[in-house]
Amino acid sequence: MKRVSTVTVRKRIVTVFLFGLLLFMIIDFRLGYVQFIIGDKLMDKANESWSRDIVFEADRGKILDSNGDILAENVSAPSITVVPRQIQNPQKVAENLANILDMPEKKAYEYVTKNESSVNIHPEGRKLSEKQEKAVRTLNMDGVYLAKDSKRHYPYGDYLSHVLGFTGIDNQGLMGLELYYDDKLKGEKGSLSYYSDAKGKKLESIADIYNAPKDGLDLKTTINSKVQTIMERELDLAVAKYNPDGASAIAVNPKTGGVLGMTTRPNFNPENYQDVDSSIFDRNLPIWSTYEPGSTFKIITLASALEEETVDLEEDEFDDDG
C-alpha cells in the first residue's frame, strides 16, 4: 500500500477544515440574514397564512346641532361572519341560519360550505335586528360569529333629511353631510384575529388578537334643532293648505352666515330612503334651486345710498317716465 506523506495529510486536513469553515460561515450568514434582515417580513407572511380576521366596523361619528343635540347617531346592529371549516354540521347550521335570516336554506348552505377562510352573509346577514341577534347567540353555533356593526339612526325622523343625507349598508356616506364629511365621520375598521391550522380549525392554544376599531369624529353643525322644529311644522301646515308641487325654507344667522335651519318638501326618512324615488332625495332645493335676488336687492342699494348720504328721501325727487 502506498503511504501518504504527512505533508499531504496536513494539506487535506486544512482543505477540509477551510471548506467546513466556509460552509459554516455561509450557513451562519444565511441564518443571520433570515433572522435579522427578513425575519419580520417572513413572520408577517406566516401570520398572514395562519391567522384569520373577523372585521369589526368602527362607530361612525355623530352629527350634532349647535347645542349638542344629536341629529344622527348609531344603533347596534351586528352582522354575521361564517368560518366554514369550523362548522361540523353544515346542514343543521344552514337550517338555523335560514330560519333566523328569512332566506332560502339552499342559499344558506352555499355560504356555510364555501371553500374560504371566512364568509360574510350578504345582505341577509348584515345589520341584524335585536330578535335575530338574540337567536344567533342562543344557538351558539360553531363557526358562526357575530361581528360588531351598527346602522345609522336619525332621532328626528325626516327632519333635515336633505341636509343630513344618509348612509349605505356599509355605513358609507351617500348624500348630504354624510357624504361630504364621510372621510372624517367613518373612522377606521378593527379586527379580531385568531390562528388556525391547515384545515382552518381554530388553534385554541394561541390567544386571539384584538385590534380595536377607531371611531369616527363627531360633526357639530350650525343647525338649531328648535328653529328647525318650527320650520318643519310651518312648512307642513303650508303644504297641507296649498298642496304645492314643492316647497323649501331656510333660516340663516345674518351675522355669521350659519344655517340655523333648512327643509324641503317633499322629504323622506333617511333610514328608509330606498322607499322613495331618487328624484325626491337627490337634490336639496334651497341649495340646488338657486336664482337671482332680483328686485329684493334694491333694498341693499337703497340702504347703501342712505348710509353714504348720496340721496335725501325728504328733498330729492326722481321722476321715472317709463
Image (cartoon, helix red, strand yellow):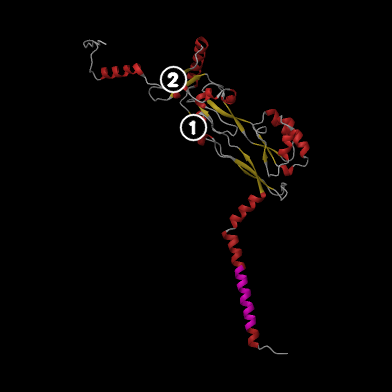
Q: Residue at x 62, y 34 (%)?
A: 149
Where is 30 relative to 78, above or below? below
Label 1 Cα crowd, 10 Å radius (few <14 / some 14-19 / many 20+):
some
Which label sits on residue 180? Answer: 1
Q: Is residue 221 visible?
A: yes
Identify residue type, mark 1. Answer: Tyr
Instruction: Identify the residue at image location x=58%, y=60%.
Output: 36
Q: How many marks?
A: 2
Residue 35: x %, y % from top left = 60, 60
Give the x, y percent position of residue 41.
59, 55
In terms of secondary structure, where does tag 2 sit?
Answer: strand
Q: Which residue position holds label 2?
A: 251
Q: Closest to the observer: 62 or 27?
A: 27
Q: CA distance from mark 2 to mark 1?
A: 21 Å
Q: Is residue 138 visible?
A: no
The N terminus lies in which quarter of the figure? Answer: bottom right
Residue 276: percent from left, percent from top = 57, 22
From the image, state whether disc 2 or disc 1 is nearer to you: 1
Q: Is residue 40 left or right of residue 134?
A: left
